[in-house]
Amino acid sequence: MFRGTFAVVNLQAITNNVRTIKGLLRPSTKLLVAVKADGYGHGAVPAATAALAGGADALGVASLEEGLQIRTAGIEVPILVFGRVSASGLPIAAEYDISVTLTSDWRNEQIPRRSKAVKVHLKLDTGMSRLGYTDAEEAADIAKWVMSREDMNLVGVYSHLACADAPDDTHLKGQVGRFEQALRILAQHGVRPRLVHLANSAGTLRNPDLHYDMVRVGVSAYGYPPSPDFTLSVHLQPALSLYARIQRLAVIDVGQTVGYGATFTATRRTRVATIPIGYADGYFRILSNRSEVWVNGFYAPVIGNVCMDQLMIDVTDIPEVKPLDWVTVYGQAVPQIWNQVDFSSQPDAVRTEFVLETFTETAAESPVVSLDRLAKQAGTISYELMCAISPRIPKIYFEG
Ligand SMILES: Cc1ncc(COP(=O)(O)O)c(C=O)c1O
């Protein structure tokens, strides 16, 4: 906190978003919330806890290691690893009751002996061309091998959608068709796992026909649409807000330059503010000279190249900017009172209480500085910016 850069994570927003999504499902449909990549940058364990409070039935992670982090934090719900776990990891998965994805054969690997059976979800590739079996007969063959083993328990079959957020549903329909066809072939071979699942956030929000026995949502639980133009039928609340504090204010003359490589040259007398966030924090360098941050109710352009730990902004046109004022990088705009009371010099607990109290009090009237807008400026998607947040940014959590 001494640096003047931090994030506030509203865990209640995650809980509310999950509850809202759960409300779209049939009572029998399970809801898995993806907490991979450190909970999309929000913190895996706090995000998981918040999601469970909102009615999540299961959690999704990318690796066995991520699953172990959740399990050893004392969380007991089903956890599914989306990525491939090598055969050597199966005893650990079994011991910690973490389900694994069968995406390619384990038969050509040494499978260690174990006492408990590992839960397995068979992955089908229906058009993503990333993981899983494309050929349903081959999938049936491996599924029967899994079913024949005492140390494996086939509990699910699933696939992943590539274009469920796109207005044109041609690709989506193709994937659904191939999924249905594969399910029929598996059933003909006697393979009928208990949990059939397909939909990510986009699929879940788009069409109840895609819900099957379980849905797997990530980005929507954190309060964002799967893509900026996706029409949301429900209200979602972004959970994370990112702030940094002006370290220095200076005026440069016409012709002076800003930052490494001198990529910005002043064409007027320019007030330059320096803020302590850079590409090592997850504010990508590609955003140099092309993004904005929110200062006292206005967007201020980022000028010059983003540095590793800092960036510079043009605040010439923004009234009443002072050194140590707070800047909103994205999320709920800074409460004005933060610029009037020096809470950063308070002891930890007092400071945190002040931040949370004032943040909550002003939530209703504060504008939200769009992460989707920043993502567009970076030529990427909200997902990438969220999970790029560096561990060195302190997070203040609250359940408002
Ligand atoms: C297999 C799988 N299922 C579900 C999700 C959640 O996707 P989203 O964040 O778009 O809801 C992901 C995320 O990439 C995934 O890889």
Image (cartoon, rainbow, N blue to C red):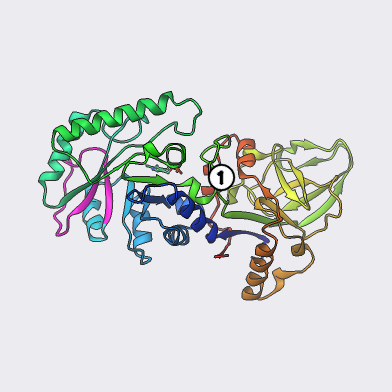
Please check the rendered image and state whether residue 370 is part of the magenta-colored stretch, yes or no. no
Q: Is residue 262 left or right of residue 33?
A: right
Amino acid, disc 1: Leu
Q: State the image coordinates of residue 140 (x, y, percent, origin top left).
A: 17, 34
Which range is magenta?
98-120
**Residue at the outermost front position:** 27
**Residue at the outermost top position:** 170
Q: Quadrant of the C terminus?
A: bottom right
Q: Quadrant of the N terminus?
A: bottom right
The majority secondary structure of the magenta stretch comes to: loop
Indicate the quadrant where residue 113 lies: bottom left
Please check the rendered image and state whether residue 107 is part of the magenta-colored stretch, yes or no. yes
Indicate the quadrant where residue 264 lies: top right
| Identity of the residue drawn at 17% across and 35% down | 187
Q: State the image coordinates of residue 280 (x, y, percent, origin top left).
A: 58, 50
**Considering the numbered disc 1 on the image, is that residue within a helix, a strand or a loop?**
helix
Q: Which residue is mark 1?
A: 385
Asked if ligand 1 lies within 8 A of label 1, the reply is: no
